[in-house]
Image (tube, rainbow, N blue to C red):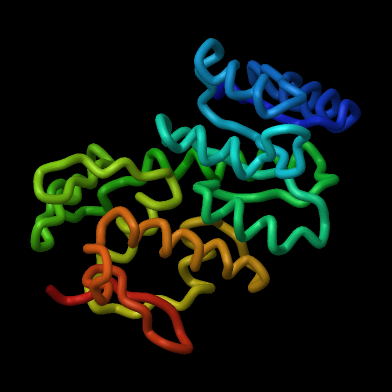
């Protein structure tokens, strides 16, 4: 079971979530502040981070950005109900998913498994290595390079790119992408898709140009465009 770093300042949630995950076989290290959590990143080497948005001192968004400077470890945000603005900001900072508190351990475990499945996306019968202009996509190695330089992608970003590029010019609705990449089935989480697309574009598109790879189909969704 993957090692989980839990960064949460509420002691009851920290203890409850930690206990529930340990009972399911996870090794869990917990921190009550962003500073402490960042310190544990280096010593604990987590395979997934559960990160509260509203932390004292360095908040969850800042912690997420700091982690993304050096690591593409999966990050799931823990948020309070009604924190819609903070959720979007957290997703833009690089989080892969979010969970609204309070949440049962079963729900958290299901989200953890869904995020980690994105790290083992099969090639699906397509060529293992594809070239799309200057973009190289290695489906078996789950890596992407642009102009020969490796592009670091979070789990949700690589799975979204793999899915779109597998069917060039096919238009996918936000709901279709939500169900495939995030395994969510309710429309309210369409912001997950939009935030992930924006992050992905900053990494694979040329700055200040019309998106070449991930194209918006207004009023519907996205497609992997012709080159």
Total marks shown come to 0
Residue name at image x 21 percent, y 53 percent: 125
Query: Is 53 left or right of 104, judged from the image as shown?
Result: left
| Above or below: residue 87 compared with residue 33 | below
Which residue is drawn at the image coordinates 31% and 76% (left, top)? 215
Viewport quadrant of the N terminus: top right
Instruction: Indicate whether 35 appears above or below 176.
Output: above
Res. 39 image quadrant: top right
Corner quadrant of residue 141: top left
Q: Residue 178 placed where, x, y %?
A: 52, 65
Q: Position of residue 102 (x, y in %)?
A: 85, 45
Extreme residue toward the bottom, this view? 219
Q: Residue 65 placed where, x, y %?
A: 52, 41
Which quadrant does the C terminus fall into? bottom left
Q: Is residue 99 left or right of residue 19?
A: left
- Single out the residue that lies furthest toward the top: 43
Residue reaching furthest right? Answer: 12
Q: Is residue 150 left or right of residue 61?
A: left
x%, y% of residue 67? 50, 33
In the rendered view, would you say 110 is above or below 223? Answer: above
Residue sitting at 59 percent across and 40 percent down? Answer: 62
Image quadrant assignment for residue 154: top left
Identity of the residue drawn at 9% across and 62% down: 133
The foreground one among 205 and 16 is 205
**Residue 122 shown left or right of residue 57 in the figure:** left
């Amino acid at each position: 079971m993957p090692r989980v770093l839990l960064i949460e300042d509420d002691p009851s949630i920290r203890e409850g979530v930690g206990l529930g995950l340990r009972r399911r076989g996870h090794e869990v290290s917990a921190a009550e502040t962003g500073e402490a959590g960042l310190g544990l990143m280096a010593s604990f080497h987590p395979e997934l981070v559960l990160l509260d948005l509203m932390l004292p001192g360095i908040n969850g968004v800042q912690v997420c950005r700091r982690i993304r400077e050096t690591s593409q470890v999966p990050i799931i945000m823990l948020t309070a109900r009604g924190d819609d603005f903070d959720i979007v900001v957290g997703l833009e900072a690089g989080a892969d998913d979010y969970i609204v508190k309070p949440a049962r351990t079963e729900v958290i475990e299901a989200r953890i498994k869904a995020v980690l499945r994105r790290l083992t996306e099969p090639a699906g019968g397509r060529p293992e290595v594809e070239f799309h202009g200057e973009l190289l996509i290695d489906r078996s190695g789950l890596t992407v390079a642009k102009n020969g330089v490796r592009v670091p992608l979070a789990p949700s970003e690589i799975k979204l790119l793999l899915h779109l590029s597998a069917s060039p010019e096919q238009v996918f609705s936000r709901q279709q992408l939500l169900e495939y990449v995030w395994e969510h089935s309710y429309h309210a989480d369409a912001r997950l898709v939009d935030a992930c697309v924006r992050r992905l574009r900053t990494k694979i598109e040329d700055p200040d140009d019309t998106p070449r790879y991930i194209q918006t189909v207004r009023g519907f969704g996205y497609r992997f465009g012709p080159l």
